[in-house]
Amino acid sequence: MKIVIDADCIVAGTLAASGAASRLLDLWHDGEFEVITCPQLVKEVREALLRPRIANRYGVTQEEVDELVGRLQQESIQVPDPTDPPRVVPGDPGDDYLVALAVRNDADALVRRDRHFDGLSVAGLRTLYPGEFLKEVTG
């Protein structure tokens, strides 16, 4: 199974010791499924974790972010950034690339926390919250 994980889920899973997003990352690292990433997604994760309000609140260091980015680059299926993604995500055109990334690389699902994906129907792509995806994977 191949999925795309929204940057918000990766950040939440990195910062929280427990919860659905954290468990999602654990299962990925355990090889339960493959994750598709692109440079834009990795950059979004890096920038979010290094925002002063996040870095200061959670004590995130540059070294920790570099380690996570390294893992993303080594352990995921790296593909180029999608070019000319169609405008499909209501309320957040900045996330259109995630849908294109998932659809163009035959992902089984896009796992996200953002509500603006609710009800989205594009080329049969399923958009799931982390908890919904975990129920499918773990039964």
Image (tube, rainbow, N blue to C red):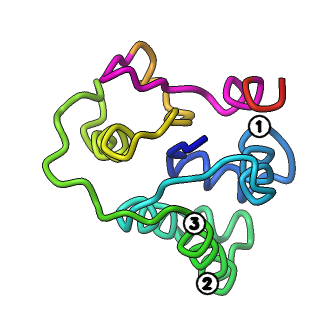
Dividing the image into 4 quarters, which one contains the N terminus? top right
Q: CA distance from mark 2 to mark 3?
A: 9 Å
- Which residue occupies the foreground of this view, 76 or 92? 76
- Three-letter amino acid code at the position of disc 3: Leu
Q: How many badges with numbers are in the image?
A: 3
Disc 2 residue type?
A: Gln
- The residue positioned 46% from the left and 40% from the top of the image is 107
Q: Which mark is residue 20?
A: 1
Instruction: Farthest residue to the left: give it.
Output: 84
Which label belongs to residue 49? Answer: 3
Q: Amino acid at mark 1?
A: Ala
Query: Which mark, by number, is residue 62?
Result: 2
Cα–Cα span, label 1 and label 3? 19 Å
Instruction: Locate residue 23, reporting x and y percent.
Output: 80, 45
Numbered disc 2: secondary structure:
helix
Would residue 85 be found to the left or right of residue 11 on screen?
A: left
